[in-house]
Amino acid sequence: MKRENTTAVNLYLALAYRFLILLVLYTLCRLGFYFFNHGLFQHVTLSKYLYMLWGGLKFDVSALIYINAVFILLQVVPAPFKYHDGYQRFCKWIFIISNSIGIMANFADFAYYKYTLKRTTATFFSQFSNEQNKFKLFMDFLADYWYLFILYALIIWAFVKLYELVRVKKAENFKWPDYVLQTVLMFAIALACLTGARGGWGSGTRPITLSNAGEFVDTPDQMSLVLNTPFCIFRTLKASKLKPVNYYDEPTLNTLYNPIRLPKDTAAFKKLNVVFLIIESLGKEHVGGLNKDLMGGRYKGFTPFIDSLIEQSYTFTHTYANGRKSIDALPSVISGIPSIREPFVLSVYSGNKTTSIAKLLGDKGYETAFFHGAPNGSMGFSSYTHLAGIKHYFGQNEYKKNEDFDGTWGIWDDPFMQYMAQTMNTLKQPFFSAFFSLSSHHPFKLPDQYAGKFPKGHLQVQEVLGYTDMALRNFFRAASAMPWYKNTLFVLCADHATVSYFPEYQTTPGYFSIPIVFYYPGGDLKGKADKNVQQIDIMPTVLNYLHYDKPYFALGFDAFDKRKDNFVVNNNDGTFSFYQGDYLLINDGKINLSLYNLKTDRLTQNNILEKEPLVAEQMEKYLKAFVQQYNNRMIANQLTAN
C-alpha cells in the first residue's frame, strides 16, 4: 500500500468508513439482483423500490455485523498493538476475504433466484452435500454466467481500492486514559452491533427474520428485493422447528380436514403395476397440449410426445408442484408430504416415521424400484428412497456405461430410460417403480448427435425438454412391446416448474404450474377435469384407483373424487399460497394478504380481498386446518395411519 495515496484517519472513523463502503456495495448488489430478475417483479414502482432499498439497509446492517464481528472486535480492543502496520494488514485481509464471500453469495442469487424464487438459505449446502461433481457444477455455472464473474471481480477490485484509500493513524503515547476511553467505546460499539444484528432494541423487539421484510413490500414475492443472501443464510443456519397450533378442537379439525385416508369402497384391489415418471424442470408452460389458449391457439410447445400422451390420458385444468426444488418433489409425490418453507428431507422432522406408496404397495407384494441416472448419492435420493421403502435403486453406479455420461449430472435421459425399460422387464409383477430424469437440468446440454434437432424457444431449458420428450417417446415405444405394459398405470409429472416466458406463467400460480397426467393403456382413463390438483394428491389418487383397502396417511386428496372442496397448498418462502375452487389466497402464516379469482384474473393483478371477505374467511378456515394437522403431526411424529 502506497502511503502517499492514502489518508491517515482516526481508527474509529476508518471503521465507520469501511462499514459505509459495505452498505453501498450491498445496495449495489440489491440493484443488481433486481436488474437480473426484473421480469419476475413487474409491478414494482420506482417509489416503492426506493422504499425497499431503504428497508433493505436494516437487513444489510444485520448481515454485515455477523460477517464482520471478528474484524470489529480486532479494531476496538483497547490496546496499543492494534495500531501497528502488521496488525492492520492482518485485519485488512480478514475484512476483504470475509466480505468478498458475502458479496459472492449475493451475486450467486442474481442467477440462481429465477430457479427457486427465493433467496438462498442455509439448506442449500445440505441440498448439494451429496453431489460428487461440485467443482464441475460450479464451473458450468461460471461458464453460463461468466459476465457475473467479471462483474464480481470488478466489484472486489473496487472494494479493495476503496479500503486502501484510508489508513489508521498511529496513536502516540498510549496511556491509561486511552485504555478507559477505548474500553467505554468498545462496550458502546458492542451495544450498537447487538442492536444492529437484532434489527432494533426494546422489550418488544425480537431479532429480525426473513418475514420482517414483509413490512416494506406489497406482496410476499417482493420480499427477496429487500433481503440479502448472507442474511438469509445466517437466519436459517439453526434448524427451524414448527410450533404447535390449536385453531380447532379435534372433532372440528377432522371434519374440516383429515389426512387419514379410509377405503372408499369394498371393490377388489386391482394389482396394476404403477410407474411414476418425474421429469426435471417440466413446467406446464412448455407443454403445448396444456396451453391451447396461448398465442391465440397457435402455441405448439416443446413436447410433442407428451402432447400425444395427454390425448390418451386423464389430467386436470390446474395442476401444481408443492415446491420449487428437486429435493421437494420425492416426498410430495411418493409420500404425500409437502415441504413447508424448507425441504422436508432436510428438516428436523425428516427422521419421523412416514409411509409411502412404495411401502403400502410393497405390503401388497409389489416389487419396488427407483431409477435416477445420477451417481447414487446425488440429491440424497438413495437415502430417501431407502427410507420410503423402495427395495431396488438403479443409478449411474448400476448403469456402468461411462460413455453415456453427460459430463455434469449423470447418464443422458434417452439411454438411461431404455435401460429402465429393460430393467423393469425383469421385475416381478406387480411392481412399483419411479423414475427421475436429469437431462433438462442446468446447464441444459444435449448429446452432440442431437445438436440442432429440437426447437430452441425463448428459454434454454426448452430445447433440452425436446430431447427428454423424445426419450419418453422411445421409452414408451420400448415398454409397449413388453408383457407388463397394458397392466400398468403411468403417472407423469414434473419435479417443479422453472423459468418462464409467457406473462400467464410469471405469476404465483404460474411459478408452480406443472403437468400431472394419468395414463393407463389397458383401460379407458381419459379426460380432463376442471379441478385443482397437486403433487401430494398423486399417492392417494393412485391408491384409491387401485381400491387400496386399508387406512393410510396422506396430506393430499384423491384427484378423481367428484368433491371439489379439496385444496392445493404450497409454501416456498414462509408465505402460503392456498388454492380452492377458482380462488388463490395468499397468507403469511398470520394474516391474509391477498385474494385472486384465477378464473377471471389469470395474471393475478386484482386483489379482491376486501371485496370478497367471506371467500377469504372460508379458505382461511381450511388453511388453518391444514397448518394444524401438518404442524402438530410433524411435532408429535404422527405421519402414519396408526
Image (spheres, helix red, strand yellow):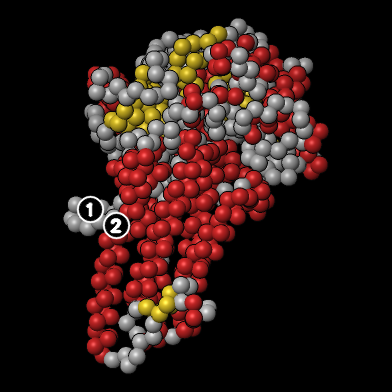
Instruction: Identify the image quadrant of residue 621.
Output: top left
| Label 2 CA crowd tier, 10 Å (few <14, some 14–19, many 20+) | many
Above-or-below relation of 613 to 202: above
Instruction: Give the residue pinned by disc 2.
Output: 198
- Coordinates of residue 547 in the picture (x, y in percent): 51, 14
Look at 26% across and 90% down and name the residue there. Answer: 176
Compare marks 2 and 1 and give the one earlier in the sequence: 2
Image marks 2 and 1: residues in contact by CB distance under 8 Å? yes
Residue 205 image label: 1
- Judge from the rendering whether residue 259 lies leftward or rightward of residue 284; answer left or right: left
Q: Nearer the viewer, residue 101 or 313?
A: 101
The three-letter code of the residue at mark 1 reads Thr
| Outermost residue to the left | 203
Q: How far from the left and from the top, in percent, is residue 586? A: 34, 29
Could you tell me which residue is drawn at 35 percent across and 90 percent down? 172
Marks counted in the figure total 2
**For the residue labelled by badge 1, is the local secondary structure a helix, a strand or a loop?**
loop
Q: Residue at x 55, y 28 (%)?
A: 501
Q: Amino acid at mark 2?
A: Arg
Above/below status of 19 relative to 521: below
